[in-house]
Image (cartoon, grey):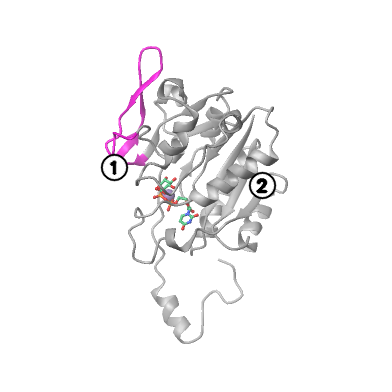
Amino acid sequence: PKIYAITPTYARPAQKAELTRLSHLFMLVPNLHWIIVEDSNSTTTLVRNVLLRAGLDNRFTQLNIKTPPEFKLQGKDPNWIKPRGVEQRNLALTWLRSNVDAERHAIVFFMDDDNSYSVELFAEMSKIKPGRVGIWPVGLVGGLMVERPLLNDNNQVTGFNAAWRPERPFPIDMAAFGISIDLFFKYPQASFSYEVQRGYQESEILRYLTTREQLQPLANNCRDVLVWHTRTEKTKLSAEEALQRQNKRSDEGIEV
Ligand code: UGA
Ligand code: MN
Protein backbone atom coordinates (compact mmCIF):
# COMPACT_ATOMS: atom_id res chain seq x y z
CA PRO A 1 0.00 0.00 0.00
CA LYS A 2 0.91 3.63 -0.40
CA ILE A 3 1.93 5.36 2.85
CA TYR A 4 0.96 9.02 3.24
CA ALA A 5 3.40 10.67 5.64
CA ILE A 6 2.07 13.95 7.07
CA THR A 7 4.78 16.36 8.23
CA PRO A 8 4.17 19.78 9.78
CA THR A 9 7.28 21.94 9.49
CA TYR A 10 8.29 25.50 10.37
CA ALA A 11 11.13 27.85 9.48
CA ARG A 12 14.15 27.84 11.80
CA PRO A 13 17.90 27.56 11.21
CA ALA A 14 17.96 23.73 11.21
CA GLN A 15 14.87 23.26 9.03
CA LYS A 16 16.72 22.38 5.82
CA ALA A 17 18.99 19.93 7.64
CA GLU A 18 16.00 18.14 9.19
CA LEU A 19 14.07 17.96 5.93
CA THR A 20 17.11 16.82 3.95
CA ARG A 21 17.55 13.92 6.40
CA LEU A 22 13.92 12.93 5.91
CA SER A 23 13.99 13.37 2.13
CA HIS A 24 16.75 10.77 1.90
CA LEU A 25 14.52 8.32 3.73
CA PHE A 26 11.91 8.87 1.01
CA MET A 27 14.55 8.01 -1.60
CA LEU A 28 14.83 4.58 0.06
CA VAL A 29 11.10 3.93 0.50
CA PRO A 30 9.32 4.10 -2.88
CA ASN A 31 5.74 3.66 -1.60
CA LEU A 32 5.93 6.82 0.56
CA HIS A 33 4.02 9.97 -0.43
CA TRP A 34 5.00 13.07 1.53
CA ILE A 35 2.36 15.61 2.54
CA ILE A 36 4.49 18.41 3.88
CA VAL A 37 2.61 21.27 5.50
CA GLU A 38 4.51 24.45 6.19
CA ASP A 39 3.57 26.56 9.20
CA SER A 40 3.70 29.76 7.12
CA ASN A 41 1.62 32.12 5.00
CA SER A 42 2.90 30.60 1.76
CA THR A 43 4.92 27.63 0.62
CA THR A 44 8.66 28.26 0.38
CA THR A 45 11.29 27.53 -2.25
CA LEU A 46 13.58 26.22 0.50
CA VAL A 47 11.19 23.35 1.19
CA ARG A 48 10.37 22.82 -2.47
CA ASN A 49 14.07 22.57 -3.36
CA VAL A 50 14.62 19.87 -0.74
CA LEU A 51 11.79 17.83 -2.29
CA LEU A 52 13.04 18.31 -5.85
CA ARG A 53 16.68 17.60 -5.01
CA ALA A 54 15.64 14.22 -3.61
CA GLY A 55 13.86 13.47 -6.89
CA LEU A 56 10.45 13.20 -5.23
CA ASP A 57 8.72 14.96 -8.14
CA ASN A 58 5.39 13.06 -8.14
CA ARG A 59 5.57 11.85 -4.58
CA PHE A 60 4.92 14.97 -2.56
CA THR A 61 2.19 17.48 -1.82
CA GLN A 62 3.36 20.84 -0.52
CA LEU A 63 0.77 22.76 1.51
CA ASN A 64 0.87 25.61 3.99
CA ILE A 65 -1.20 27.01 6.82
CA LYS A 66 0.01 29.30 9.55
CA THR A 67 -0.62 28.53 13.21
CA PRO A 68 -2.83 31.34 14.59
CA PRO A 69 -0.67 33.74 16.69
CA GLU A 70 -2.52 32.94 19.93
CA PHE A 71 -1.38 29.31 19.62
CA LYS A 72 2.18 29.92 18.42
CA LEU A 73 5.04 29.41 20.86
CA GLN A 74 6.80 32.65 21.84
CA GLY A 75 10.59 32.98 22.17
CA LYS A 76 11.02 31.91 25.79
CA ASP A 77 7.95 29.65 26.16
CA PRO A 78 8.80 26.11 27.17
CA ASN A 79 8.03 23.97 24.10
CA TRP A 80 5.29 21.99 25.85
CA ILE A 81 3.09 24.97 26.67
CA LYS A 82 1.12 24.81 23.40
CA PRO A 83 0.40 21.97 20.98
CA ARG A 84 2.35 21.96 17.74
CA GLY A 85 1.25 20.88 14.26
CA VAL A 86 -2.51 20.90 14.95
CA GLU A 87 -3.53 23.19 12.09
CA GLN A 88 -1.06 21.61 9.69
CA ARG A 89 -2.09 18.00 10.33
CA ASN A 90 -5.76 18.91 10.02
CA LEU A 91 -5.17 20.58 6.65
CA ALA A 92 -3.40 17.42 5.46
CA LEU A 93 -6.38 15.30 6.58
CA THR A 94 -8.73 17.59 4.65
CA TRP A 95 -6.49 17.24 1.60
CA LEU A 96 -6.48 13.45 1.93
CA ARG A 97 -10.25 13.23 2.28
CA SER A 98 -10.80 15.18 -0.94
CA ASN A 99 -7.88 13.98 -3.09
CA VAL A 100 -7.37 10.31 -2.34
CA ASP A 101 -9.33 7.32 -3.63
CA ALA A 102 -11.39 6.11 -0.65
CA GLU A 103 -11.52 2.57 -2.03
CA ARG A 104 -7.77 1.99 -2.32
CA HIS A 105 -5.98 0.64 0.74
CA ALA A 106 -3.34 3.06 2.04
CA ILE A 107 -1.73 4.04 5.35
CA VAL A 108 -1.52 7.44 7.05
CA PHE A 109 1.41 8.27 9.34
CA PHE A 110 2.13 11.48 11.26
CA MET A 111 5.84 12.05 10.72
CA ASP A 112 7.41 14.95 12.65
CA ASP A 113 10.37 16.54 10.93
CA ASP A 114 12.90 16.03 13.72
CA ASN A 115 12.53 12.36 14.75
CA SER A 116 14.82 9.56 13.53
CA TYR A 117 13.10 6.88 11.43
CA SER A 118 14.41 3.51 10.27
CA VAL A 119 13.57 2.39 6.75
CA GLU A 120 12.34 -0.83 8.42
CA LEU A 121 9.52 1.08 10.11
CA PHE A 122 7.83 1.59 6.74
CA ALA A 123 7.99 -2.12 5.87
CA GLU A 124 6.23 -2.79 9.18
CA MET A 125 3.64 -0.08 8.51
CA SER A 126 2.81 -1.69 5.18
CA LYS A 127 1.37 -4.62 7.17
CA ILE A 128 -1.45 -2.49 8.65
CA LYS A 129 -4.76 -4.10 7.68
CA PRO A 130 -7.79 -2.22 6.33
CA GLY A 131 -9.82 -0.79 9.19
CA ARG A 132 -6.96 -0.99 11.67
CA VAL A 133 -4.46 1.22 13.47
CA GLY A 134 -0.96 -0.28 13.71
CA ILE A 135 1.19 0.39 16.77
CA TRP A 136 4.87 -0.06 17.73
CA PRO A 137 7.40 1.17 20.30
CA VAL A 138 9.09 4.59 20.22
CA GLY A 139 12.58 5.11 21.62
CA LEU A 140 13.80 8.03 23.78
CA VAL A 141 10.45 9.53 24.72
CA GLY A 142 8.32 10.24 27.78
CA GLY A 143 11.35 10.08 30.08
CA LEU A 144 12.05 6.44 29.16
CA MET A 145 14.48 4.63 26.88
CA VAL A 146 11.43 3.15 25.19
CA GLU A 147 7.67 3.64 25.44
CA ARG A 148 5.83 0.53 24.30
CA PRO A 149 2.46 -1.21 24.26
CA LEU A 150 2.07 -4.25 26.52
CA LEU A 151 0.57 -7.35 24.89
CA ASN A 152 -1.21 -10.41 26.30
CA ASP A 153 -0.59 -14.01 25.19
CA ASN A 154 -2.87 -13.48 22.19
CA ASN A 155 -0.75 -10.50 21.13
CA GLN A 156 -3.50 -8.00 21.90
CA VAL A 157 -2.64 -4.62 23.40
CA THR A 158 -3.76 -4.59 27.02
CA GLY A 159 -1.80 -1.61 28.29
CA PHE A 160 1.24 0.62 27.94
CA ASN A 161 4.45 1.08 29.92
CA ALA A 162 4.23 4.91 29.82
CA ALA A 163 5.61 6.77 32.83
CA TRP A 164 4.42 10.25 31.81
CA ARG A 165 0.64 10.75 32.15
CA PRO A 166 -0.10 7.02 31.94
CA GLU A 167 -3.80 7.80 32.54
CA ARG A 168 -4.16 9.09 28.97
CA PRO A 169 -6.49 6.90 26.86
CA PHE A 170 -3.53 6.26 24.51
CA PRO A 171 -0.33 7.17 26.42
CA ILE A 172 1.89 7.06 23.32
CA ASP A 173 3.79 9.42 21.02
CA MET A 174 2.63 10.61 17.59
CA ALA A 175 5.35 8.43 16.01
CA ALA A 176 3.95 5.24 17.60
CA PHE A 177 1.09 4.52 15.20
CA GLY A 178 -0.08 4.37 11.58
CA ILE A 179 -3.69 4.40 10.42
CA SER A 180 -5.51 2.59 7.62
CA ILE A 181 -6.86 5.40 5.46
CA ASP A 182 -10.41 3.99 5.27
CA LEU A 183 -10.89 5.01 8.92
CA PHE A 184 -10.60 8.69 7.95
CA PHE A 185 -13.49 8.27 5.52
CA LYS A 186 -15.52 6.20 7.98
CA TYR A 187 -15.01 8.82 10.72
CA PRO A 188 -15.05 12.19 8.92
CA GLN A 189 -14.95 14.17 12.21
CA ALA A 190 -11.59 12.67 13.24
CA SER A 191 -9.12 15.54 13.65
CA PHE A 192 -6.70 17.26 16.03
CA SER A 193 -7.77 19.98 18.43
CA TYR A 194 -6.32 22.87 20.45
CA GLU A 195 -8.88 22.19 23.15
CA VAL A 196 -7.02 19.27 24.68
CA GLN A 197 -4.55 19.04 27.57
CA ARG A 198 -0.84 18.77 27.01
CA GLY A 199 0.06 15.31 25.70
CA TYR A 200 -3.46 14.44 24.59
CA GLN A 201 -3.16 15.03 20.79
CA GLU A 202 -2.49 11.34 20.12
CA SER A 203 -5.45 10.28 22.27
CA GLU A 204 -7.60 12.94 20.62
CA ILE A 205 -7.20 11.57 17.10
CA LEU A 206 -7.18 7.90 18.10
CA ARG A 207 -10.37 8.08 20.17
CA TYR A 208 -12.31 8.52 16.92
CA LEU A 209 -10.58 5.68 15.10
CA THR A 210 -9.86 2.69 17.31
CA THR A 211 -10.01 1.03 20.72
CA ARG A 212 -7.02 -0.42 22.54
CA GLU A 213 -8.20 -3.94 21.74
CA GLN A 214 -8.39 -3.22 18.01
CA LEU A 215 -4.80 -1.93 17.76
CA GLN A 216 -2.57 -4.03 15.48
CA PRO A 217 0.82 -4.65 17.11
CA LEU A 218 3.78 -4.49 14.72
CA ALA A 219 7.60 -4.45 14.93
CA ASN A 220 8.12 -7.97 16.27
CA ASN A 221 5.14 -7.79 18.62
CA CYS A 222 6.29 -4.39 19.85
CA ARG A 223 9.78 -5.54 20.82
CA ASP A 224 11.73 -3.70 18.08
CA VAL A 225 12.47 0.04 18.19
CA LEU A 226 12.38 1.48 14.66
CA VAL A 227 11.74 5.16 15.47
CA TRP A 228 13.32 7.50 18.01
CA HIS A 229 11.88 10.74 19.36
CA THR A 230 15.09 12.72 18.89
CA ARG A 231 15.04 16.49 19.33
CA THR A 232 17.49 18.87 17.76
CA GLU A 233 19.30 21.39 19.93
CA LYS A 234 18.36 25.00 19.25
CA THR A 235 21.01 26.51 16.97
CA LYS A 236 23.29 29.02 18.68
CA LEU A 237 23.90 32.03 16.44
CA SER A 238 25.49 34.68 18.64
CA ALA A 239 28.35 35.33 16.18
CA GLU A 240 25.85 35.55 13.31
CA GLU A 241 23.84 38.11 15.26
CA ALA A 242 27.02 40.13 15.86
CA LEU A 243 27.67 40.08 12.11
CA GLN A 244 24.12 41.21 11.40
CA ARG A 245 24.59 44.22 13.67
CA GLN A 246 27.30 45.26 11.21
CA ASN A 247 24.96 44.57 8.28
CA LYS A 248 26.91 41.44 7.32
CA ARG A 249 26.02 37.75 7.29
CA SER A 250 27.86 34.46 6.73
CA ASP A 251 25.15 33.12 4.40
CA GLU A 252 24.90 36.01 1.96
CA GLY A 253 23.56 34.46 -1.25
CA ILE A 254 23.74 30.95 0.26
CA GLU A 255 20.78 28.80 1.29
CA VAL A 256 21.63 26.92 4.50
C1 UGA B 1 5.77 15.93 20.62
C2 UGA B 1 5.12 14.97 19.62
O1 UGA B 1 6.10 14.07 19.11
C3 UGA B 1 4.50 15.80 18.48
O2 UGA B 1 3.98 14.95 17.49
C4 UGA B 1 3.42 16.69 19.08
O3 UGA B 1 2.85 17.50 18.06
C5 UGA B 1 4.04 17.58 20.14
O4 UGA B 1 4.77 16.83 21.12
C6 UGA B 1 2.92 18.35 20.82
O5 UGA B 1 2.67 18.10 21.99
O6 UGA B 1 2.29 19.16 20.15
P1 UGA B 1 7.89 17.63 20.13
O7 UGA B 1 9.23 17.09 19.78
O8 UGA B 1 7.73 18.21 21.50
O9 UGA B 1 6.80 16.53 19.86
O10 UGA B 1 7.37 18.71 19.05
P2 UGA B 1 8.11 19.34 17.78
O11 UGA B 1 8.98 18.32 17.11
O12 UGA B 1 8.73 20.62 18.20
O13 UGA B 1 6.86 19.65 16.82
C7 UGA B 1 6.10 18.64 16.20
C8 UGA B 1 5.94 18.96 14.71
O14 UGA B 1 5.27 20.21 14.55
C9 UGA B 1 7.29 19.06 13.98
O15 UGA B 1 7.20 18.42 12.72
C10 UGA B 1 7.49 20.56 13.84
O16 UGA B 1 8.24 20.93 12.68
C11 UGA B 1 6.06 21.08 13.75
N1 UGA B 1 5.91 22.48 14.26
C12 UGA B 1 6.45 22.83 15.46
C13 UGA B 1 5.24 23.42 13.50
O17 UGA B 1 4.75 23.11 12.39
N2 UGA B 1 5.12 24.71 13.98
C14 UGA B 1 5.67 25.10 15.17
O18 UGA B 1 5.53 26.29 15.55
C15 UGA B 1 6.34 24.13 15.93
MN1 MN C 1 10.04 16.69 17.88
Classify 29 as above or below 77.
above
Q: Is mark 1 within 8 Å of ligand 1?
A: no
Q: Earlier in the sequence, mark 2 or mark 1?
A: 2
The residue pinned by badge 2 equals 60
Q: Position of residue 208 (x, y in %)?
A: 48, 32
Dot 2 alpha-carbon crowd within 10 angstroms: few under 14, some 14 to 19, many 20 or more: some
The amino acid marked with disc number 2 is: Phe
Q: Which residue is mark 1?
A: 143
The residue lying at 67 percent from left, 54 percent from top is 53
> What are the residue bounds of the magenta stretch?
140-168
**Magenta highlight on residue 152:** yes
Camera-side residue: 13 or 37?
Answer: 37
Ligand 1 has an atom within 8 Å of the beta carbon of the residue at disc 2: no
Q: Is residue 140 above or below residue 213?
A: below
Q: Quadrant of the N terminus?
A: top right
Q: Is residue 214 left or right of residue 162?
A: right
Q: Which residue occupies the extreme top position in the image? A: 154
